[in-house]
Image: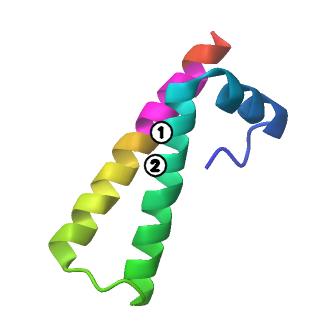
Amino acid sequence: MFEEQPQQELDSLLKSNPEFKQLYQRHRDLDKKVMDAELGVLPIDDISLMQMKRQKLAVKDRLARMYEARLQ
């Protein structure tokens, strides 16, 4: 996430905005859990996996809005 953005801008936002930092970490945690579930490392039912994916997408959308709002 945010691979196309300058790392310095991302680092600055992570340091200056605790909510953004918390959401960024939440997205990373969900991403790891989803990948583990899809690989079969994390046993989880399909409904729970879909819920995690929805949560991950919602967090990503919120992060993107926060990042864009910072630039305006």
Question: Of helix, strand and loop, which one carries label 1?
Answer: helix
Where in the figure is residue 24, as x and y percent of width and height?
A: 54, 43
Name the residue located 43 percent from the left edge and 32 percent from the top edge: 62
Asked whether disc 1 touches disc 2, contact meaning CB atoms under 8 Å apart, the reply is yes
Where in the figure is residue 26, as x and y percent of width and height?
A: 46, 48
Name the residue located 53 percent from the left edge and 55 percent from the top edge: 28
Q: Quadrant of residue 71?
A: top right
In the image, farthest residue toward the left? 47
Asked if 45 appears above or below 63 in the picture, the reply is: below
Where in the figure is residue 18, as x and y percent of width and height?
A: 55, 27
Q: Name which residue type carries label 1.
A: Leu
Q: Quadrant of residue 10?
A: top right
Residue 23 is labelled as 1
Question: Of helix, strand and loop, which one carries label 2?
Answer: helix
Q: What residue is shown with label 2?
A: 26
Dot 1 alpha-carbon crowd within 10 angstroms: few under 14, some 14 to 19, many 20 or more? some
Where in the figure is residue 14, as x and y percent of width and height?
A: 66, 32
The colour scheme used here is rainbow
